[in-house]
Amino acid sequence: MVKVFQLYEILACAGFLTLFHLDTEHLTIRELCLDDAEFILLLLNEPSFIRFIGDKGVRTLDDAQQYIRTGPLASYEKNGFGLYLVQLKSDETPIGMCGLLKRETLADVDIGFAFLPAFWNKGYAFESASAIMVYAKNVLKLPRIVAITDKDNDPSAKLLEKIGLRFDRIITLSPNEELKLFISEELNK
C-alpha cells in the first residue's frame, strides 16, 4: 500500500486557498485550479483520453478553464472531493488527474484517473489511485468505491483490480455506451 505522507495543507492556487493536498513518495496530488488550464487542455485532447474517457469538447484555454470551473471546482464545493491534479513531487511537472466523482448515474462514488502517455507504466497511476483510496476510506469514510472503464481499456481494469476493486458487470450509462463496472468491498465495516 502507498504511504500517504501529508494530507492537508493550505495552498494558494489562482488566488484562492485550497485545502486538499496529498503527498506520496513520488507525487503531489492537489486541487485543480484555473492556472492548470494549459495542462488540462493538453490532457483532455490526448487521443487516449478521447478514446477511453470521451471527448469533452475542450479546445481552447477558455474551454479548459470552464471545464475546471464546472467539473472539479464545482465538485469540491458540492461534494467535498473531485478530480485532482497529479504532479511529480521532484519538479512539480503535471502528469495527470486522479480523484473521486459523484455521478448522478451511479449510486456510489467512483474513482477516476487519466495520465499523459509519457507517464504510463511508471507506477504513478497506481501510487495516486492507492492514495485516493486511502483518503476515501480513512478521511471521507466512504462505504464503497466503484469505477467504470471502457470495455477495451485493459490497463485501467488491471489497475483497478490492483487497488482492490473487482469487476462486477457491464453497465450502460448512456445509449450505445457499455462500460465495465468495478466495485470495492465495504471500505468501512
Image: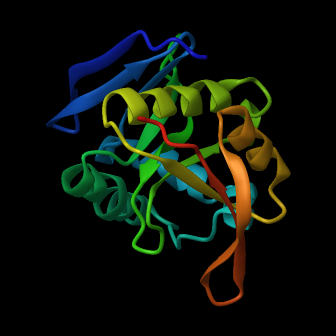
User: Among all residues in the image, which is located at the extreme left?
Assistant: 16
Q: Is residue 70 left or right of residue 174?
A: left
Residue 51 visible from this viewpoint: yes
Question: Is 172 or 189 nearer to us in this picture?
Answer: 189
Q: Which residue is at 41% across, 36% downward?
A: 136
Q: Which residue is at 61% across, 17% downward?
A: 1
Residue 94 visible from this viewpoint: no
Q: Is residue 159 left or right of residue 89?
A: right
Establish if 82 lies above or below 9. Answer: below
Q: Is residue 148 left or right of residue 40?
A: right
Q: Is residue 8 left or right of residue 176?
A: left
**Which percent across, then down, holds residue 109?**
43, 54
User: Among all residues in the image, which is located at the extreme front?
Assistant: 189
Q: Quadrant of the C terminus?
A: top left
Rendered image coloring scheme: rainbow
**Which percent across, then down, holds residue 115?**
64, 41
Question: Is 31 or 137 nearer to us in this picture?
Answer: 137
**Which percent across, then down, holds residue 3?**
52, 11
Establish if 177 lies above or below 152. Answer: below
Establish if 30 lies above or below 117. Answer: above
How many badges with numbers are in the image? Answer: 0
Q: Quadrant of residue 163?
A: top right
Q: Quadrant of residue 165?
A: top right
Q: Which residue is at 73% across, 33% downward?
A: 162
Question: Is 24 or 50 nearer to us in this picture?
Answer: 24
**Which percent across, then down, holds residue 104?**
39, 73
Q: Which residue is at 67% across, 58% downward?
A: 49
